Amino acid sequence: MLRGILFRITFLLRKQFNVIHYYSDFRESQWQPLDWQIIQQEKQLRELINFAYKNVPYYKKVFDSVKIKPSDISSIKDLEKLPLLTKKIIRENWSGLIPKNIDKIKYMHGSTGGSTGETLKYRKSLKDAARGLALLYRGWGYGGYKLGDKVAIIAGSSLIPSAEPVPNTKERIKEFFTPPLPLRRYSSYEMSEDNLFRYFHDINKWKPDIIRGYASSIYLFAKFIKNNNLELNFRPKAIFTTAEVLFDRQRKMIEQVFGVKVFDTYGVNDGGISAYECDAHNGFHVDTERGILEVVNEKNKQITDKQGRILATSLFNYAMPFIRYVTGDLGIISSSQCSCGRKSSLLKELSGRITDFLKLNGVIIGSPVLTVLMGKVDAEQYQIIQESPGSVTIKIVPGVNYNKKRDEDFIKESFVSHVGKVGIKFEYLSAIPAQGDRKYKFIINKVKGVREV
């Protein structure tokens, strides 16, 4: 209770008490009927569209070029009339996406990496950022989080600014005043054996209520604890994974080691969308209070119960509106609702990045197929890299039951049955290092024409 009070006081002192206000409202709105949630979204969508047309030069130009007036966009379905917004378009039209009245808007700067490794910079209104934080806390609430709970984060630069494996005293003091409160950060960049021991002893002493981080980082930490027969003297309320596809093997290992359920999460901060697993674990509940999440087919038409590209429309980011923004992710929106009682739409399946695909001999193989394939061999970690149209390199951290000849032959035969003759090179490692933004990528496609726009 005391930590909860201090949590609220800190936000008040930081002049961010609207986060607490939104959090209170959102805890109520999650139980509203889906129709009611859509009405609120569409009301805000109309306001955003009018603002964008009047104040943002890029959208004025785009709307006029396709002969669309703001009054033509009154529903989520009407978004299909508009073209998509890609990272490439944003970079090429940076100045045109800045509102003419930007001096009247309170905003912050943001950036994101992406699978190409090229940073995308953007502006984010403080109102949008506050709503995002409030939704984060509500989403953690699905796993039992309460304001003021202690949170440990094991991740890279996309979640934590510090590059130090375990921050020093000065950094710890800074963490105390960094939302969520109280917070401790552990870098996924240098997860050496020495650092993992340091992580374990520090976390075991501090006893966080919540552990959050990249799926691969928390999995490696859990595996380290198990392999070294280390004993945890606390049990967190829940584990929250994010930023990467969470595989069944990872979920099982993490839950076995920590003795609590894993709650997977999804978020595109630049696009203003997010979704969280509840305790029913039937998929991700799509947040409607900040943005609109669409899943579209190859013709950019909205679809349900089928895999498609995920688009994001940030409803409150007036500092740099993103409308029908291509996130680079693939997923499935379900037409059914969750048994937990929440009425929001379910992102039933998150299939990975658009770039998490191989294209060999004209055949595209997606990450779900590759996950099933590699799940049939005892590989602790794997990474598939395509650097040319007809060949791949497969890096493997073998498990105790991995048989080099048998499993290499099996993988080769599986590839041939899908795409025909292809060159495969195997490399064996003790661990697969993180890439770029310090997330662990299972599939890296370096062939021109397949990478993300």
Image: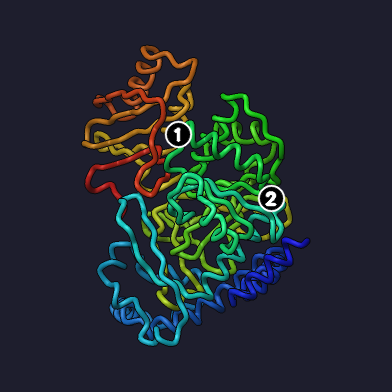
- Residue 187, compared with residue 130, is above or below; it is above
**How far across and down, in percent of the image, does residue 251 sit?**
58, 36
Q: Which residue is located at x 31 percent, y 82 percent?
A: 57
Mark 1 highlights which residue?
A: 192
Kind of residue at disc 1: Ser
- Residue 230, compared with residue 175, is above or below; it is above
Secondary structure category for the residue under label 1: loop
Number of disc labels: 2
Q: Are marks 1 and 2 in contact (CB under 8 Å)?
A: no
Mark 2 highlights which residue?
A: 143
Kind of residue at disc 2: Gly
Does 230 sit left or right of 328 as displayed? Answer: right
Pointer 1 or 2: first along the chain: 2
Q: CA distance from mark 1 to mark 2?
A: 30 Å
Location of the C terminus by quadrant is bottom left
Which-is-in-front pick, marks 1 and 2?
A: 1
Does 26 sit left or right of 264 as displayed? Answer: right
